[in-house]
Image (spheres, grey):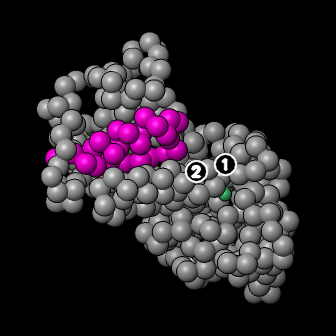
């Protein structure tokens, strides 16, 4: 048995602890009747910071160790793309943090939207470009640079500018800024999104729009302007590739904890978002538990993507209702 935890809306709200989250991790890290460590990984659609920094931050909030070896955020599997593309446009996130993430992943030549604005401010007519932003930007003559792929790592902080620059590149000849391809398909560079959540719980009472909403807007604009559909790749929950990746992480975490590299038979996904955590877990054959501390604010269960293991007040109730008691009982009877 093992657990896969969603983070936002299950264990924390942004930087704020959900108190039951800390108790759950205490239990799984050995504060239980048998004193055993119960394997668990963190599977979040969150993004925008290197894994090491995010795990350090979570360890502090949760008062429990969170290792990068048990942690997957939305763009973690995109690390593999560094092998395939040399020059990439990295979009989203606060300030220049996603450039740091991409560097850490091994991308060799990284461009961010601010580099393009610093080269030519008329690209983004409504943008107020600050001196501070300019200082950290890396402008060059982008009319001579072939950008090979667009990677949306995190939520856009400026939809108008980012959409404009992405659209310019999607319509260009092989990613050469300032050109317009005659055929919108054959010379189009690929675009990847780190996750597809429409909504995200925040301090605001009603969940806010997330990367999925940004993507849908972009797709609609692309279709209206070019007359063709935008092909794209989406990572994160509920995409199957992310769950397969989670299996690999789970198996190697099992080896770290118990010296045996294998995928546990029973995996419980604890999530707050039916449209990502629950639908993905259900499709992948995991047991799914929906909690009421985040996006889900409905009745007995979600109408469209019901959790197959049940709906719980919070993460502590989900973990202790059946699974942990079950394992403790069976271990005691041996
Ligand atoms: O949708 C954005 C992100 O904050 C969601 O994170 O942990 O709920 O998958 P999580
Ligand atoms: Mg969540």
User: In the rendered view, would you say 253 is above or below 125?
Assistant: below
Q: Which residue lies at the image location 38% right of the left edge and 39% below the top edge? A: 164
Horizontal and vertical percent for residue 206? 75, 50
Residue nearest the viewer, comparing 50 with 283: 283
Q: Position of residue 146 (x, y in %)?
A: 17, 40
In the image, the segment drawn in magenta is 150-174
* CA distance for labels 2 and 1: 6 Å
Is disc 2's CB within 8 Å of ligand 1? yes
Quadrant occupied by the N terminus:
bottom right
Does residue 29 show up magenta in the picture? no
Seen as rendered, the residue at the extreme bottom is 333
Q: Nearer the viewer, residue 256 or 93?
A: 93
Q: Is residue 24 left or right of residue 153?
A: right
**Element type at mark 2:** loop
The image quarter in which residue 188 lies? bottom left
| Proximity of marks 2 and 1: CB atoms separated by less than 8 Å | yes
Q: Is residue 168 magenta?
A: yes
Disc 2 marks which residue?
210
Which residue is found at the position 41% from the left and 52% from the top?
Answer: 221
CA neighbours of label 1 inside 10 A, class few (<14), some (14 to 19), many (20+): some
Question: Viewed as shown, does residue 222 lie left or right of 14?
Answer: left
Say which residue appears at 73% left-offset and 78% top-offset.
303
Residue drawn where x is 45% and y is 25% of the image: 127
Q: How many numbered badges does the structure rendering display?
A: 2
The reply to whether residue 22 is in sight is no
Q: Position of residue 138 (x, y in %)?
A: 30, 23
Question: In this figure, which residue is indicated by the disc labeled 1?
Answer: 208
Q: Mark 1 falls on what kind of element?
A: strand
């Amino acid at each position: 048995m093992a657990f896969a935890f969603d983070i936002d809306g299950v264990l924390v709200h942004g930087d704020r602890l959900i108190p039951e989250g800390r108790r759950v991790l205490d239990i799984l890290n050995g504060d239980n009747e048998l004193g055993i460590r119960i394997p668990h990984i963190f599977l979040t659609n969150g993004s925008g910071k290197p894994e090491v920094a995010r795990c350090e931050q979570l360890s502090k909030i949760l008062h429990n160790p969170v290792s990068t070896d048990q942690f997957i955020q939305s763009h973690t599997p995109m690390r593999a793309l560094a092998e395939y593309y040399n020059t990439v446009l990295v979009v989203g996130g606060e300030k220049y943090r996603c450039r740091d993430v991409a560097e850490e992943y091994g991308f060799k030549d990284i461009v961010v939207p601010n580099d393009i604005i610093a080269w030519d401010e008329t690209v983004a007519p409504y943008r107020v470009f600050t001196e501070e932003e300019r200082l950290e930007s890396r402008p060059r003559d982008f009319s001579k640079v072939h950008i090979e792929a667009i990677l949306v790592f995190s939520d856009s902080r400026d939809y108008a500018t980012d959409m404009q620059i992405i659209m310019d590149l999607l319509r260009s000849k092989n990613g050469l800024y300032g050109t317009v391809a005659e055929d919108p398909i054959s010379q189009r560079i690929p675009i990847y999104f780190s996750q597809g959540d429409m909504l995200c719980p925040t301090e605001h009472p009603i969940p806010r729009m997330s990367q999925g909403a940004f993507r849908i807007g972009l797709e609609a604009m692309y279709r209206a302007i070019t007359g063709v559909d935008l092909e794209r790749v989406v990572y994160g929950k509920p995409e199957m590739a992310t769950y397969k990746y989670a299996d690999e992480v789970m198996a190697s975490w099992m080896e770290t904890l118990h010296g045996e590299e294998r995928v546990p038979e029973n995996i419980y996904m604890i999530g707050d978002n039916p449209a990502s955590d629950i639908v993905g877990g259900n499709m992948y054959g995991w047991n799914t538990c929906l909690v009421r501390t985040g996006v889900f604010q409905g009745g007995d269960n979600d109408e469209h993507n019901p959790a197959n293991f049940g709906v719980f007040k919070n993460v502590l109730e989900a973990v202790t209702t059946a699974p942990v008691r079950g394992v403790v009982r069976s271990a005691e009877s041996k």
